[in-house]
Amino acid sequence: MTTMRTSALVLGALAACLSLGACSTMGKKPAAPASAYTTPPEGDDKISIAHLFGGGDKKKTQSYNEQAGIGVNAYLWRASLDTITFMPLTSADPYGGVIITDWYANPQKPDERFKVTVYILDSRLRADALNVSVYKQVQTNGQWMDADVSQQTQLDIENAILTRARELRLSNVKN
């Protein structure tokens, strides 16, 4: 009986050692040559701040956006945040291109409130790369009830964002 217990303990310890040893190599990637980390891409000695935010040389910027997997236009992203800056943010996802605000009530009209969701759908600066959804609620007898929002309100916000994005792009081109 003692021999069986000893054998079981030895086999259990051996299994534990093998399991832990196998875990130490999980998730490791093969080492890349040192030159992969020290050699900049051809023709690129530096990456400027302008490149990180969608500025700089158009061909290089497009290349960086593709390499980094950035799915939205930096000008539209910045312009969207600038345009709805007066509203509290609930969520802002720069990779997915979605900005969601919390409910905002104008102090002059405390019985109605608005919520905005901005979708940036493309990496190019185009009007069809932007979609804005506006939600409105009106307070009736102490309860918030959904209300219709004019299509013009959504278009006005989209146009304000597009105008700001063009201004940002033009200011970057002049630099």
Image (cartoon, rainbow, N blue to C red):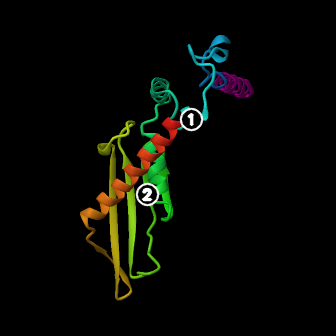
Element on which disc 2 rests? strand
Residue kind at label 1, given as amino acid type: Ala
**Tag 1's secondary structure?**
helix
Is 108 in front, or is 24? 108
Q: What residue is pinned by disc 1?
A: 50
Q: Is residue 99 rendered to the left or right of residue 151?
A: right
Task: Give, as a three-letter code, the residue at label 2.
Answer: Ile
Q: Which residues are magenta?
A: 1-21
Residue beneath label 2, please?
100
Where 124 sits versus 17, above or below?
A: below
SS majority, magenta: helix
What x and y, as percent, mark residue 62? 45, 27
Can you tell which quarter of the image residue 40 is in?
top right
Compared with 20, 86 (above or below) is: below
| Residue 124: quarter of image | top left
Q: Position of residue 75 (x, y in %)?
A: 45, 43
Query: Where in the figure is residue 142, as x and y percent of width and height?
Result: 38, 86
